[in-house]
Amino acid sequence: MRRLYAVLPIGLTVLLAACGSSNSKTTAPPTTIAGKPAITTVVLLTHSSFAASKSVLAEFTKETGYKVKLVQPGDAGVMVNEAILRKDHPVADALYGVDNTFLSRALDADIFEPYSPPALGTITVAAPDTQHRVTPIDTANVCVVYDKAWFGHSGRPAPPASLDDLADPRYKNLTVTENAATSSPGLSFLLATIAEKGNDGWQPYWKALKDNGLRVVDDWTEAYQTDFTAGGGSGDRPIVVSYGSDPAADVVFSDPHRATPNVGVIASTCFQQTEYAGVLHNAHNSTGGQALVNFLLSKAFQQDMPLQMYVNPVVKGAQLPAVYQQWAVVPAEPLTMDAATIGAHRDTWIKEWTDLVVQ
C-alpha cells in the first residue's frame, strides 16, 4: 500500500515475476517478422511498491497481445540505479516509478527513448522534459500526518497545524521522520521545508526540530508502522511524515472496519511527488514499451491506482473510488520544486541535512 523508496543504496538482484491471467482471452500477438518468433511479452522495470489488479493487466494483454512481466529489484532508487547500470543492455522495455525527487539522475544518464503517448493531451500534470523522454503517470503528496485520537485531551495539546508547530515546545519528542539520505518521503519532507523556508531558513528550522526532540529513522516502514502511535504497533510518536492518502488507507485497512480515519493530515505541509514512466533506450521490445506507457494512461489503469498504490491519477476524467475521494487529502496548492532544481542541489542538500540532523 505504501511508498518505500530508497534513494542511495544500489542493488543488482533482479526479481522477475509474471503478471496477468494466462486464462484470459487475448488478441493475436504481434506478427512474426523475417521468420523470427513474435514478441509476446513486454517487460516493465518498476519499484517494489508497484501494484495493479490482475484484471487490469489482463485487459492490457487482451488489447495488445502482450503479457506483462515485472522486474522489481527493490525501491525506486535501486530501480533507477539498475536502469543506469544496464543502460546499453536494459533488463526491461519500459520503466515506471521514477519520481521528481531524483528524475534528473535518470534524465542525465539518458536511459529513455523519446516518446509522446497519444493521451499526452489529457494529462493534468505538465511533462518535465521537452524531449518527451518521460510521461507523468501519477502524483502523491508527502505530508505531516498525526494520530487524531492522541491529541486534545488529558492535558495534551490540539493537533499541530503547520510546519512551525513541529518546533513548538508543546510538541517536543512527538515527531518522527525518515532519513532524507535513505528514504524518498524523508527527502520529500526535506524539500518541503526548503520550499517553505527558503535557502536561508531551512537549516535553522531543522536545528529547531532537532532541538525539539525530532526522531529520524531509516524508512517509512519503521516510521509509520513501528514508531507512529496510530501505525498498528506500539509506537510512541503521534506525528509522522507520511502521505496524504493515509486517511483513506486507514479506513480501507481498518479491522474491524471503521467509517472514519484515525489519522489526520496537515495539508499545508504536503510536498507533491510525481511519478513518471518511459520507454528504455535500447529496449528489446520498444513497441511493447510504448504500448505499456500508453496503457498506464488508460482509464482502466488510472482508476485502479488509488486503491492499489494509494496515488492520484493524472488523466482528466479518471474517477476516484468513493473512500479515496472522501478521505485522501489532495491539497490545491502543495509545496513543489522542479526536477532541475532538485537535481542541481539534491546531493548538497542531503549532505548539509545529514551533517546538521543525523551526525
Image (spheres, rainbow, N blue to C red):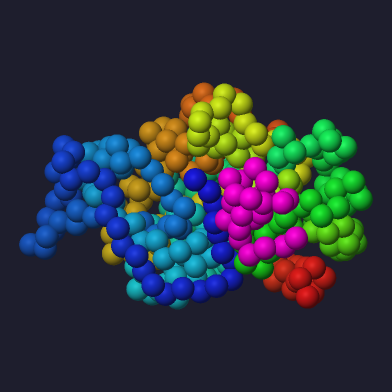
Q: Position of residue 41 (x, y in %)?
A: 23, 55
> Does residue 359 lie above or below 217 as drawn?
below
Q: Is residue 336 left or right of residue 218?
A: right
Observer-nearest of 109 and 236:
236
> Does residue 46 lie above or below 272 as drawn?
below
Q: Is residue 198 left or right of residue 224?
A: right
Q: Position of residue 269 (x, y in %)?
A: 76, 44
Q: Is residue 38 left or right of residue 242?
A: left
- The answer to if 302 sits in the magenta stretch is no
- The boundaries of the magenta stretch are 215-237
Q: What residue is at 14 percent from the left and 51 percent from the top? A: 31
Observer-nearest of 175 and 124:
175
Q: What residue is at 70 percent from the left and 71 percent from the top? A: 347
Q: Position of residue 270 (x, y in %)?
A: 71, 44
Work out whether residue 297 can be spotted.
no
Work out whether residue 318 can be spotted.
yes
Q: Is residue 181 left or right of residue 52?
A: right
Q: What residue is at 50 percent from the left and 49 percent from the top? A: 135
> Farthest residue toward the left?
35
Q: What residue is at 36 percent from the left and 61 percent from the top? A: 71
> Does residue 336 lie above or below 34 as drawn?
above
> Does residue 31 lie above or below 333 as drawn?
below
- The answer to if 219 sits in the magenta stretch is yes
User: How many discs mark residues in the rendered view?
Assistant: 0
Observer-nearest of 252 and 23:
252
> Farthest residue toward the front?
154
Res 199 → quadrant:
bottom right
Quadrant location, the C terminus: bottom right
